[in-house]
Image (cartoon, coloured by chain):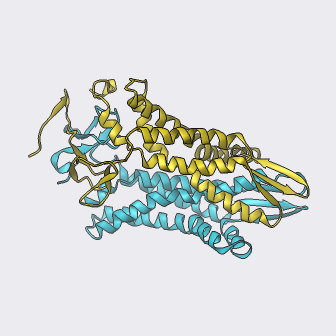
Chain colours: A yellow, B cyan
Amino acid sequence: MLPMSERHPHHASYPELLACHECDTLSKIPALKPGRAARCRCCGHVLLRNPKGGLDRPIALYSAAFILLLLSNAFPFLTLEIQGRAEVANIFGASLAMYRAGMAELAVAVFLTTILAPALLITSSLYVLLGVRLRRPLPALRTLLSWISQLEPWVMLDVFMLGVLVAFVKLGNMATMHIGISLFAFVGLILASAAATAAFEPHLLWQRMAYGRARRHAG
Amino acid sequence: MRARDAGLAGCHTCGLVLHLPASGHTHCPRCGADMHFRKVNSVSTTWAFLLAAMIAYLPANLYPVMTVTSFGKAQSDTIMSGVMYLFLHGDWPLALIVFVASVLVPLLKMLALVYLLVSVQRRSHMRKQQRIRLYRIVELVGRWSMVDIFVVALLAALVNVGAIATIEPGVGAIAFTVVVILTMFAATSFDPRLIWD
């Protein structure tokens, strides 16, 4: 019925097959041209993508995102002027304000979604991509690669940007607002990380990783 | 052909398809993740997160998310009154986006998850394609509800200009964040493959 291919002492694994995450339908891994994606024939879920530009494009885009992440946290984000007094805030200031107001839980949530999760996602993606691209058996490649897809929902840069717009409107009546350098870097960061995510398919990296050095308890 | 019918399962982390032993549980040889035919206790875990979210939904909407104090006068805003303020004083397209993100999305998301859970528990065969689409939307839009929390954090960071005005986040903001996070956990613990079983 199905071709058997014993690749591991205790597991019969089928690297030529894919099981849809959303409906469990089996498909053969197709040969995809660059820029194409394979969808599940049962439910239409995207099974596998083959983004154009190989590994170099996501490496370039994540590097750009990394620089923009540093810039967007290094300079004033917004400046508010009320009656001649100016209040400067950066992104970290949003979590800091929550902490100072005695809401440490919210400070953690805001810090996680606007700074920590994006930073972890960008650096671990870069690390894994470079490790595979340069064929170096860097430590913790697998662990970081499995983190990446779990981190994604917690990166809320775009949601934060909508929050900035709302704050702008709410304060527009009572104060003058000035856009800081970091806000421009932040918009660039959103665009670069969206493009990087689109150019990055973790499945292809998993396929390129050798079985031999899998974690010990796997056997 | 479905993977489970062939005794196979796809790894949720790396996608490798494996033959599972009789116990129905193993570790993926490629990435080391736990592997099962279906997410373990998916329905009851999702119910637990969802019910907790529903409980937190009440204080999230009844208590103020922030209190603005200017010239000794304090004014508290709930999620709903914040949206109303935007409708009256800001531009309505933005008010509409915030209304959808912070009022409509959490409510519809919880209702959608209830519907998905009940239909899976009743082993319904109806409208599978629509239900999987509903699940994808639920997974995708949940995070946008955080927008209100970010607004409160930004306002609090910007408007602490001494005596002129202060903005304090309220208890409602914590409850609202709890709702968003719990519904996100509920969406990830739900196994969409159950729709087809």
Identify whether A154 is placed above or below A171: above
Q: Is residue A204 visible?
A: yes
Q: Position of residue A3 (x, y in %)?
A: 11, 41
Is residue B65 or residue A14 the one in the foreground? A14
Residue B194 quadrant: bottom left
B182 on left or right of A49: right
Q: Is residue B173 visible?
A: no
Identify whether A172 is placed above or below A210: below
Looking at the image, which residue is at 26% across and 46% down? B37
Is residue B146 or residue B67 the one in the foreground? B146
Where the N terminus of chain B falls, by quadrant? bottom left
Looking at the image, which residue is at 33% across and 40% down? A204
Q: Position of residue B107 (x, y in %)?
A: 52, 67
Q: Position of residue B16 (x, y in %)?
A: 27, 40
Residue B72 quadrant: bottom right
Looking at the image, which residue is at 56% across and 57% down? B179
Is residue B1 or residue B195 the one in the foreground? B1
A112 on left or right of B82: left
Identify whether A57 is placed above or below A44: above
Is residue A47 or residue B103 the one in the foreground? A47
Q: Position of residue B65 (x, y in %)?
A: 70, 60
Q: How many marks?
A: 0
Where the C terminus of chain B falls, by quadrant? bottom left
Identify whether A130 is placed above or below B160: above
B111 on left or right of B64: left
